[in-house]
Amino acid sequence: MKLREPMPELDGATTWLNGEKAKADLVGEKPTLFHFWSVSCHLCKEAMPDVNDFRDRFKEDLNVVAIHMPRSEDDLDLEQIKAVAAEHDITQPIFVDSEAKLTDKFDNQYVPAYYVFDKDGQLRHFQAGGGGMKMLEKRVNRVLDEMKKATE
């Protein structure tokens, strides 16, 4: 995806864990952070406390949605996805993308990967890799600040 592209529809999930979200639930109210992860991704597990911190600190101002992107056949086991999600306190909605339908819409090739959309559903930031949480926080804060200024 390119910056300023609209958020894709959230259809094609194999299943949803922790509740289901539609694009209509996310656009218009507040910005959204999508994070792609996989049960076989060590960097994803290392980054999860930071993602959970984002979820908890910004819960009033930011939607957070996890997207489980399998990297191999071994990553398709739903019970393992549930277990790893529980182990790493992933309580936000999880789009299980075992058929790569949403992954393809995002044109995503990485885990972990982060996509920040503004409240109007426009892509404002993308980054991949385990580090860079300070940069991600800066971008999230910028989108939140813009939203607050627009409502003043």
Image (cartoon, rainbow, N blue to C red):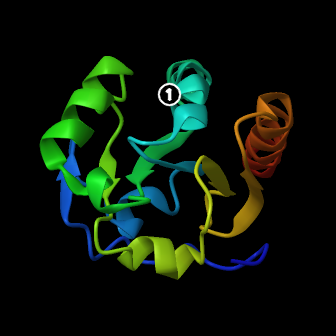
User: Residue 61: in sight, yes or no?
Assistant: no
**Position in image of residue 20 (x %, y %):** 23, 53
Callout 1: SS: loop
- In the visual, does 99 lie left or right of 61? left
Q: Nearer the viewer, residue 33 or 27?
A: 33
- The residue positioned 78% from the left and 52% from the top of the image is 150
Question: Which residue is at the front of the view, 51 or 150?
Answer: 51
Whether residue 88 is visible to the viewer of this picture, yes or no, is: yes
118 lies left or right of 82: right
Q: At 58% across and 24% down in the image, what residue appears?
A: 46
Depicted 57 relative to depicted 40: above or below: above
Residue type at the position of mark 1: Lys
Residue at 61%, 28% (x, y): give it: 47
Which residue was labeled with disc 1?
59
Q: Residue at x 79, y 36 (%)?
A: 141
Q: Position of residue 149 (x, y in %)?
A: 83, 44
Q: Quadrant of the C terminus?
A: top right
- Quadrant of the drawing holding the N terminus: bottom right
- Residue 111, compared with residue 54, is above or below; it is below
The image quadrant that residue 70 belongs to is: bottom left
Q: Position of residue 19 (x, y in %)?
A: 21, 45
Count of all numbered marks drawn on residues in the image = 1
